[in-house]
Image (tube, rainbow, N blue to C red):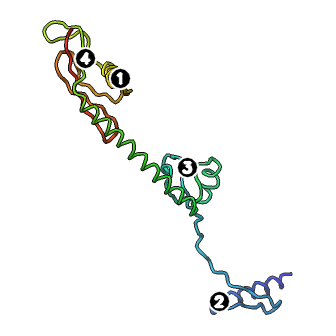
Amino acid sequence: MASTTSSVSLSWSNSFQSFAGAINEPQKFPENGRVVLPIVAQKKTKKIRKIILKEDIPDLGKKGQLLDVRAGFYRNFLLPSGKAQVVTSSLIKEMKMEEERIEAEKRRVKEEAQQLARLFETVGAFKVKRKGGKGKQIFGSVTAQDLVDIIKAQLQRDVDKKIVFLPEIRETGEYIAELKLHPEVTAQIRVTVFAN
């Protein structure tokens, strides 16, 4: 038994020494006539998928962003939760059309805000009546809600009080208020406060 293992180990060592001379040529074992093919080590390839995110994911990306992620992360997390989709040419076309539609909507909203700003600036001053006190003082103050109510009464326009920025008004006189209608569009309106 010991003699067969030593002869096998000798034949293996002889075969490996012959690989050093000719790696690309198949070798035959002398005893059994088997063909030995050389094994060339390859670097392990990373399995990566190109995906498009369907929603914002913290520490990964925003909705509609193209990303390269590992196949296991996509298969085990993103795909089952429906947060991403593999990139295809038709999906890229749909994404471009969606981006164009969103850009057109943003332009339309900005144009409407600019028209509304021109309307507010051409109206003139909004007049606010308050009960008067000593001198120029008034009782209470003029708030953003007061201005929203006046705009609704005069122009029949609904304005959110969160976009109205007023200085502190505790006296009669003329003041400038700002309406932030859009991130890029701000309308300035005059507010005249007088006592009854």
Q: Is residue 107 above or below residue 27?
A: above
Which mark sits nearer the N-terminus, 1 or 4? 4
As drawn, which residue projects farthest toward the left? Answer: 135
Q: Amino acid at mark 3?
A: Lys
Q: CA distance from mark 3 to mark 2?
A: 48 Å
- Give me the residue at 76% from left, 91% from top: 28
Please tell me whether mark 3 or mark 1 is closer to you in this view: 1
Mark 1 Cα-neighbour bin, 10 Å: few <14, some 14–19, many ≥20: few
- Give me the residue at 59% from left, 55% from top: 85
Q: Is residue 13 above or below residue 97?
A: below
Q: Amino acid at mark 4?
A: Val
- In the image, 36: left or right of 119? right
Mark 3 Cα-neighbour bin, 10 Å: few <14, some 14–19, many ≥20: some
- Give me the residue at 28% from left, 31% from top: 120
Q: Circle 2 sits in a helix, a strand or a loop, which is it? A: loop
Residue that label 2 marks: 24
Q: Quadrant of the N terminus?
A: bottom right
Please tell me whether mark 4 or mark 3 is closer to you in this view: 4
Q: Nearer the viewer, residue 187 or 157?
A: 157
Q: Circle 1 sits in a helix, a strand or a loop, which is it? A: helix
Q: CA distance from mark 1 to mark 2?
A: 87 Å
Q: Nearer the viewer, residue 119 or 50?
A: 119
Q: Which mark is residue 54?
A: 3
- Residues at badges 3 and 2 in contact (C-beta under 8 Å)? no
- Residues at badges 2 and 4 in contact (C-beta under 8 Å)? no
Q: Circle 3 sits in a helix, a strand or a loop, which is it? A: loop
Q: Amino acid at mark 1?
A: Lys
Q: Nearer the viewer, residue 60 or 126?
A: 126
Q: Which mark is residue 128?
A: 4
Mark 2 Cα-neighbour bin, 10 Å: few <14, some 14–19, many ≥20: few
